[in-house]
Every structure is written in structure tokens, then in C-alpha cells.
Image: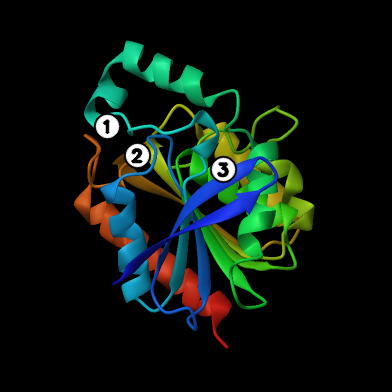
Amino acid sequence: MEMTRIEITTDDGVCPTLLFGDRSAPGVLMYLDGVGMRPALHAVADRLASAGFYVMLPDLFYRIGPYTAPEPAQLFTDPAVRAAWSARLAPTSNAANVMRDTRALLAHLPGSKIGVTGYCMGGRMALTAAGTFPDRIAAAAAYHPGNVATDAPDSPHRLAASIKARVYVGAASDDPSFPDDQKQRLSEALAAAHVDHVIETYPAKHGWVLSDTPVYDAAAADRHFETLISLLRGALAA
């Protein structure tokens, strides 16, 4: 699929954004993982576009200035690399900032209803977006998300009552950031709000979808595409 780069003005600056697929197709906003913009994310967006969607992939780390995404193997295995990268992102990569960005991004996506998907921290943002923009988002998917049902004031599960989207969460079986008690809390919040949802645990480690990570799992990644495409087609069908 052809990839087009545009720049979208937000409240805080200019967000470099990649577009994949036919603009007349159902729109999908894709939230990046904590590693940053790189070819492995492009490949996921391209495959979604090939399945019949118009995919927007913004670089939501634009606030830190020009950067090169860290090597995933080092980020996953070297605590010093991980700490340095987290320290660089933490001041600006919060839900409040990303939701302000999302408002600007949604203005550039055609169609009255769209889908969102995200990975790692992006999964948390996808669920937050579903509760923040319920009249626009009809489908929300989160794969190996972390910290989605915590005691934090901005925990996504607190927005369950506002969500109108169909929700799919693909959790990792080995993921301290999304343990069983959080899964239960999220499920209870969504059920109490009568949100159509599925929370499924994959036999894989946190980060399995992106092909350049040391925990990439091809079979689980394929199932991720199956569940995501099914969710999007079901919710965004004309």
C-alpha cells in the first residue's frame, strides 16, 4: 500500500503523520507503542490498509523533537536504555496530551465513525480515546496494553461509562503491567457500563505484535490481525 506523510497541527505543535490506504475506506487511527515510530509499525498499518481500511499512524512523540527509535532488543533487555527512554518520554506522553492530539487527528479522518487500535501504551490510549470521543469511535482495540485499570486518575477503565464502541483487549499472559486483577477490574467496569467487549489473554509476552521486538510471536500476531480486522469490519460496516 502507498504510504503518505503529512503534518497535522495540534495544540502543542506539529505531529508528523503517516497515511495508508484508500481515503474512501473506513478510517482507523493507530496509536504507536512505547518504542516509537519505525518500520515495524508501518508494516502493521500497511497490512490493515490492505485489509480495506484507511489507516492514520501519527508520531505522538513529536514533543521530544527529532529522534531515532531505540533498538527494541536493547529497550526490552537493558534497564539503563529503558530508563533513559522512559525518562525522555514520560513528561509529555500522557493521556491528556495524547487526547488533545487525538482531537486534531480526528478532524483529518473522514467518516462519522472510525476505529482505533493501539499497542503497549498505545493500547491504553486507544481505550482512553474511546471514552473521550464516544460519538466518533465505534471500535477500540488494545493489544498487550499496560496500566489500563489502575488507581490512577486517568486510568482508562474510569471512562467505561462513556464508551459506545465495541472493545477488544488482547492481553499478554506474561505482563506485569496488566495482571489478572487489572483484567478483572477492566472487565467489571466495561460490563457495568454495558459495553460490548472481549478481553482475551494470549500465550505471549508483552510486546508480541511488533515484528522487531525480541518477544515477537508470529502466531499470536496473526491472531491479532484476525481479531482486529473482524472487530473493525463488524463495527464500521456501512
Residue 56 visible in the snapshot: yes
Q: Quadrant of residue 193?
A: bottom right
Q: Nearer the viewer, mark 1 or mark 2?
A: 1
**Whether residue 169 can be seen here:** no
Spatial CA span between label 2 and label 3: 13 Å
- Report which residue position mark 1 lands on: 72
Between discs 3 and 1, the one toward the N terminus: 1
- Secondary element at image label 1: helix
Q: Is 173 on the left-hand or right-hand side of 234?
A: left
Please name the residue shown 41% across and 15% down the image.
84
Quadrant (top left/top right/bottom left/bottom right) for the C terminus? bottom right
The image position of residue 213, as x and y in percent, is 25, 38
Q: Secondary structure at mark 2?
A: loop
Mark 1–mark 2 CB contact (< 8 Å)? yes
Please tell me which of labels 1 and 2 falls first in the chain.
1
Q: Residue furthest bottom?
A: 238
Which is more N-terminal, label 3 or label 2? 3
Q: Which numbered disc covers residue 207?
A: 2
Disc sitting over residue 42 in the figure? none
In terms of image quadrants, where is residue 156? top right
What's under tag 1, amino acid-wise? Pro
Q: Position of residue 144 (x, y in %)?
A: 43, 43
How many badges with numbers are in the image? Answer: 3
Q: Say few, some or many: other residues with alpha carbon within 10 Å of mark 3 (under 14 / 14 to 19 / 20 or more).
A: many
Q: Quadrant of the N terminus?
A: bottom left
Q: Nearer the viewer, residue 190 or 52?
A: 52
Across and down, in percent, residue 198 comes to: 53, 59
- Residue in view at x 49 percent, y 17 percent: 87
| Residue 85 spot, x, y in % from top left | 41, 21
